[in-house]
Each structure stands twice: as structure tokens, then as C-alpha cells.
Image (cartoon, helix red, strand yellow):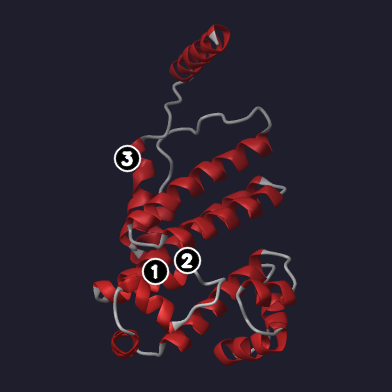
């Protein structure tokens, strides 16, 4: 333990010495916070201007291998993006699912340019996700119902189960859900399952059968029919059109 501590102290000292000698300060926390603020507040209008900001220092070194360093930097960046998005109101389950997909995609990248593009994509997608969330103005009971649906999206969801979870009668929940959300709970669950399916089609190699089963569609043909209802195309075509972007 003492040897490890000696190594850490020596490395920190060497790193600080090199930065001072080469006049290469670490990027400031204030610079990093700009992106985090944009995500947390859902400021889509600031995406382009903040993306163009030049770093006010250099990155730390997270690996002696250049590509591994960039992948580690992506992991660190996405981790903070995820927490910023949750601070902005994005549901934990969605934020973590997005995080997992970016990190897994990052591991498959073979160049720094691909990793930089993925980092920029994460910055934008998290910001848009938070912005969309902030547009919603629901009562506490409906927010609780939506949260229940989000974390059980891959399970059987019934009006009775959701009503019991939020402390309302079936009829009352059904009525206020339609009034506030603008659609029935059945339609909302279908829509959310299709959104999850779109994400899986683009960011995974799972088969249509596996996706339909995971998202609790009764059959693959039913999944395809509902997917077409909400997107205007089949899952296969959606994957072909958007899977390599």
C-alpha cells in the first residue's frame, strides 16, 4: 500500500512539474462547466456556440496509448454529461441507458476523430433530451406514473399496476393521464416502447425478435406493426437508414 501511495505522489509531482515547465495548464473547471450547464439547462440554442469554444488548457493523460487515452476521456466526459442530464431532470434509467450506449460505441471506435464525433453527438443528444423533458408540465401523480412506466418499460405494464403504484384509482388515473399527457396510457406505453426500440436498433446488434421480446411485445409481427404505426417504416428499414450514423 505504501509503495502505491509513493507512486501516486511521485506521479502527481512529476505531472505538475511538467505542466509548469511546459506552460501547459490543465483545462479549467470553468471551461468544462460550460457544456455541463448547457446540458443541465437544456439550452439547445447554445449548442453550436459552446461547441466552438477552444479549450483553455490541455487534457490530463489517462493512458500511454493514444487511442486508449481518447476512449478513457470519452468515458469520463459521458459520465459527467450523464449526471448533468439527470440534474436537468432526465430520468436516471434513460440517462444511464444513453451513457452505456455511448461508452460501448466508443470502445468500437478506431480513431480519435470517431471518438470526438461521438463525444459531440453525446453532448447534443443529452441536451435535446433534457430540453424535451423540460417542456413537460405534469402533476406529481402523472410524473410518478411516467416514472413507473420508464423503469418497467421492458415488463408487462397495466393500468391497475400503475394506479396502485401512484396511489390513485384506475378510473381516476386513466382520466387525468389522458387529460395531461394527451393520449391514453396504452398509447403512451406503446410510443415509449417504440422509442426504446429505435435506440436499440441503432445502437445494438440485437435481432428484431430479441428486441420485441425484451420490450414485451406479444409477437414480432405485432412489434413490426406498431413500429410502422409510429415511424412509418419497418424496424429493418429504420436500422438500415439510421444504424450507421
Q: Where is residue 80 in the image (x, y as percent from the top left)?
A: 44, 46
Lower sequence index among marks 3 and 1 = 3
> Tag 2's secondary structure?
helix
In the displayed structure, 22 sits above or below 200; it is above
Q: Is residue 66 left or right of residue 50?
A: right
> Tag 1's secondary structure?
helix
Could you classify mark 3 by the number of other residues whose Cα lies within 10 Å: few (under 14), some (14-19), or many (20 or more)? few
Q: How far apart are marks 3 and 1 (CA)?
A: 33 Å
Could you classify mark 1 by the number of other residues whose Cα lies within 10 Å: few (under 14), some (14-19), or many (20 or more)? some
Question: What residue is rendered at 42% in x and 67% in y?
Answer: 129
In the displayed structure, 204 sits above or below 225; it is above
The mark found on residue 151 in the picture is 2
The mark found on residue 79 in the picture is none
Q: Where is the C terminus found, in terms of image quarters?
A: bottom right
Q: Where is the N terminus found, in terms of image quarters?
A: top right
Q: Where is residue 135 in the image (x, y as percent from the top left)?
A: 31, 74
The residue that disc 3 covers is 30
Question: What residue is rendered at 43% in x and 58% in y?
Answer: 92
| Res. 198 image quadrant | bottom right
The residue that disc 1 covers is 147
Q: Is residue 6 left or right of residue 234?
A: left
Amino acid at each position: 500500500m505504501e509503495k502505491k501511495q509513493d507512486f501516486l505522489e511521485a506521479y502527481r509531482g512529476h505531472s505538475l512539474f511538467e505542466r509548469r515547465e511546459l506552460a501547459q495548464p490543465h483545462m479549467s473547471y470553468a471551461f468544462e462547466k460550460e457544456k455541463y450547464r448547457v446540458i443541465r439547462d437544456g439550452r439547445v440554442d447554445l449548442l453550436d456556440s459552446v461547441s466552438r469554444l477552444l479549450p483553455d488548457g490541455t487534457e490530463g493523460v489517462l493512458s500511454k496509448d493514444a487511442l486508449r487515452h481518447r476512449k478513457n476521456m470519452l468515458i469520463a466526459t459521458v459520465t459527467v454529461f450523464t449526471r448533468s442530464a439527470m440534474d436537468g431532470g432526465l430520468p436516471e434509467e434513460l440517462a444511464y441507458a444513453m451513457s452505456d450506449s455511448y461508452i460501448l460505441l466508443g470502445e468500437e471506435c478506431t480513431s480519435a476523430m470517431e471518438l470526438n464525433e461521438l463525444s459531440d453527438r453525446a453532448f447534443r443528444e443529452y441536451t435535446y433530451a433534457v430540453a424535451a423533458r423540460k417542456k413537460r408540465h405534469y402533476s406529481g401523480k402523472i410524473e410518478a406514473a411516467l416514472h413507473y412506466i420508464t423503469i418497467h418499460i421492458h415488463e408487462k405494464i397495466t393500468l391497475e399496476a400503475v394506479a396502485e403504484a401512484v396511489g390513485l384509482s384506475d378510473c381516476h388515473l386513466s382520466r387525468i393521464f389522458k387529460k395531461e399527457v394527451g393520449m391514453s396510457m396504452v398509447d403512451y406505453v406503446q410510443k415509449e416502447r417504440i422509442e426504446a426500440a429505435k435506440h436499440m436498433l441503432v445502437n445494438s446488434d440485437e435481432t428484431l425478435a430479441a428486441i420485441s421480446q425484451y420490450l414485451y411485445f406479444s409477437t414480432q409481427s405485432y412489434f413490426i406493426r406498431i413500429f410502422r404505426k409510429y415511424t412509418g417504416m419497418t424496424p429493418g428499414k429504420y436500422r438500415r437508414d439510421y444504424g450507421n450514423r
